[in-house]
Amino acid sequence: MGAGENNGALDERYMGLALEEARLAAEEGEVPIGAVVVCDGQVVARAHNRRETDADPSAHAEFSAMVAASRALGRWRLTGCTVYVTLEPCLMCAGLMVNARVDRCVYGAADPKGGALGTLFDVSHDPRLNHAFEVTPGVLGDEAAELLRAFFRARRRK
C-alpha cells in the first residue's frame, strides 16, 4: 500500500498483525506494543517492544520494525512503506519515520503522555523538517488501548 491509499479493511488487517506482535511483547513481560511495515502490499518487517529484554532504550516496536524493513529492502529510505503500530509513536520513532521517509503511519491508540503524531506534537507535518507523511489514527485503537490497560493492571497487582 503506497502513499495516499486508505483502505480501511487493509489497515485493520495489518493492524491485526501489529496487535499479534503486541501480544507477543506482553507474553515476554514487555509493554504490549507491536508494529509491522508494509511496502507494495507486502509485510516486509514485524516487531514488538523489546526494551527490557534487550536492555535497549531504542527497542520500540516501530523503531525495530523500520530497521528490519530497511535491512529486508536493502535501503534506508522507506518510501512506499506504511508503518502500522498499536500505539502512537513517540518523538524518537516519529523522528525516525521522518528520516526514513515513510509514506504513512497508521496507529491504534493515542498516547497522551508521549504521542508525537498529533497528541503532544505533530512531527508528521512539521514544516521545519525535510519530510512529511500521512497519519491515520485510531485503527483498532480500542483493542490496542485495552491490551495496554490490561498489561498495566496486571503489573500493578503484582
Image (tube, rainbow, N blue to C red):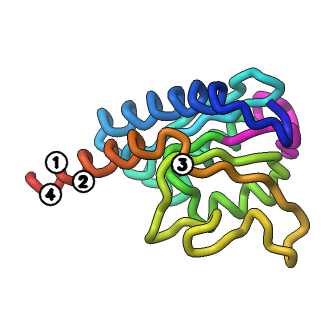
- Judging by the rendered image, the residue that carries numbered circle 4 is 156
Alpha-carbon span between mark 4 and mark 2: 6 Å
Q: Of 63 and 89, which appears nearest the observer? A: 89
Can you say whether 83 is above or below 74 in the image?
A: below
Q: Residue at x 29, y 42 (%)?
A: 29
Label located before the other in sequence (3 or 4): 3
- Callout 4 secondary element: helix
- Callout 1 secondary element: helix
Q: Check disc 4 and give the amino acid type.
A: Arg
Position of residue 77 in the picture relative to residue 6 (left or right): right
Alpha-carbon span between mark 3 and mark 4: 26 Å
Q: Check disc 2 and give the amino acid type.
A: Phe
Label located before the other in sequence (3 or 1): 3
Alpha-carbon span between mark 3 and mark 1: 24 Å
Q: Residue at x 85, y 32 (%)?
A: 74
Q: Quadrant of residue 39?
A: top right
Q: Nearer the viewer, mark 3 or mark 1?
A: 3
In the rendered view of the protein, which quadrant contains the N terminus?
top right
Residue 97 position within the rendered picture, expressed as x and y whole percent measured from the top left: 74, 54
Q: Residue at x 64, y 63 (%)?
A: 117
Q: Residue furthest left?
A: 157
Residue 93 is one of the magenta-drawn residues? no
Magenta stretch, residue numbers: 71-83
- Judging by the rendered image, the residue that carries numbered circle 2 is 152
- Judging by the rendered image, the residue that carries numbered circle 1 is 154
- Judging by the rendered image, the residue that carries numbered circle 3 is 138
The answer to whether the residues at label 3 and label 2 have Cβ atoms under 8 Å apart is: no
Label located before the other in sequence (3 or 2): 3
The answer to whether the residues at label 1 and label 4 have Cβ atoms under 8 Å apart is: yes
